[in-house]
Every structure is written in C-alpha cells, then in structure tokens.
Image (cartoon, coloured by chain):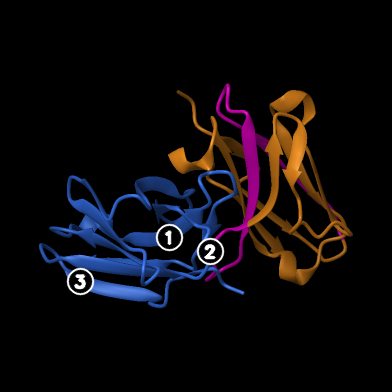
Chain colours: A orange, B blue
Amino acid sequence: EAGVAQSPRYKIIEKRQSVAFWCNPISGHATLYWYQQILGQGPKLLIQFQNNGVVDDSQLPKDRFSAERLKGVDSTLKIQPAKLEDSAVYLCASSAGQGRYGYTFGSGTRLTVV
Amino acid sequence: DQQVKQNSPSLSVQEGRISILNCDYTNSMFDYFLWYKKYPAEGPTFLISISSIKDKNEDGRFTVFLNKSAKHLSLHIVPSQPGDSAVYFCAATNSGNTPLVFGKGTRLSVIA
C-alpha cells in the first residue's frame, strides 16, 4: 500500500510569512495526526483528526496555527505568521483505528524560519 | 512536563553486541508502549510494541521489556548491526485512545 505522502519536503521562509503543508494519509485510515518535531526533541502532537472532525487540538497554538481535513482524507496545516521557533520537522501520520497498532508516518516537511 | 523520558541522548555499541535502550514514563494511565526507529530525512517507523498485560515481547533481534512497578521499559537489540544505527523513540498511549506521547529519542550508533 502507498505510504503517507507529505509535501513539500523542505521549506525556508522569513519570519512573519505564512506557510502551508499538505498530507495525504493511507487510503482508508480514519485518524490523522500532525506532529511537530523540533531538533533534539521527540515528536509533539499538534492536532488529531478522526475523519474530518477534530479530536484533540489542545497543543495547537491557535493564534498562528490552523489545520483542516476536508472530506476526511487530505489535510493541510498552516502557520501564519511564522516565528523563528516554528523551525522544525512537521510530521503527518495516519492510523486505521486505535493508536495501539501504531501510526504510519510520512517523511515530514522540514521548515526553516529565518 | 515530560511524561515519557529517554535519558540517554546517544549510545554507541560494537557490531554483534547487545544494544539496550531505556525509557521511563510517569503517567500511570499509559498501558501500551511502542518503539519507533527513525533514519535521517525519513519519518519514524514502527518497530515493536508491548501491552501492559505483558512484561516481554520479542520480534526477531528486538525484545522489549516492561517493568510496570518501576514505570520503565527497555529495548534490547541482539546482535546489533550497522543498519540499526538510527534514532529510537519510545512512545506511550492509554489503550490507544489517546495520541502517542513520545520521548526525546536515543541516537544509536553501531560501529563495525
């Protein structure tokens, strides 16, 4: 089966600019996650979708970050305006059901804010 | 507040020897634990998991041990191979009903 697709792979922007990331999960996977991984840290959950509804966005900085999952398939994560501390790898993952069976991660988007 | 801790940022092991990666957790609601492996420029990939009803799970060269009373788990790789060189993340969840919480990772280097 095809894996989780993410684009772009790399992005460099200036602070205060906006950026968007795209994720296409594994076909049929109802649950989609966006994680932020800052260098030297483990992945940190930003938002969890179940189909096209938000399950958990408690750690999403809502003043600058937004995410949507239209039609319960693809998802986009947006940052506006970006700050230097947003430099990180943004990982998208999907799972068929409960997380106990593991997530499948995409390769991530490496964002550098200068 | 780190709920999953990997206190060793790096580990270096000779090829053929055992690699032991450690993980501690603080949240007693966690009952399912997973290890992920990450190569540079790739996403983490699932390696092995263990439920709290077990104290050991084995898959080929990889074995995970769980000590619930100590809130500690470890991943053993025997024998270690150069291709095992990667960053290993420990993750935990509450019956899969909560999103995975990850540790900071341990970078394993297997020296030929």
Q: Which residues are magenta?
A: A17-44
Which residue is label 3 attached to?
B13
Q: Are marks 2 and 3 on the same chain?
A: no
Question: In screen coordinates, is B21 left or right of A22?
Answer: left
**Distance from the alpha carbon under mark 2 to that under mark 3:** 22 Å
Look at the numbered discs 2 and 3 and tell me whether their residues touch, using CB distance below 8 Å: no
Does A45 sit left or right of A58 as displayed?
Answer: left
Residue B58: give x, y in percent of width and height: 21, 48
Sequence-wise, the earlier of marks 1 and 3 is: 3
What secondary structure is found at the residue carrying circle 3?
A: strand
Circle 1: element type:
strand
Q: Is residue A24 magenta?
A: yes
Amino acid beneath label 1: Phe
Vertical placement of residue A113 versus A10, above or below: below
Which disc, if any, is residue A79?
none
Provide residue A96's location: percent of width, then percent of height.
Answer: 54, 30
Disc number for residue A42? 2
Q: Residue furthest left?
A: B16
Expressed as whole percent of the image width and height from the top left, the position of residue B75 reads: 28, 61
Residue B51 at x, y percent in the picture: 37, 48
Q: What residue lies at 53% left-to-right and 58% top-to-bottom?
A: B29
Q: Amino acid at mark 3?
A: Val
Question: Is B89 drawn above or below residue B22 in the view shown?
Answer: above
Report if the CB atoms under discs 1 and 2 are less than 8 Å apart. Answer: yes
> Image point 80% across, 64% down: which residue?
A14
Q: Nearer the viewer, mark 2 or mark 3?
A: 2
Tell me if mark 3 has few (under 14), some (14-19) or many (20+) residues whose alpha carbon lies within 10 angstroms of its own: some
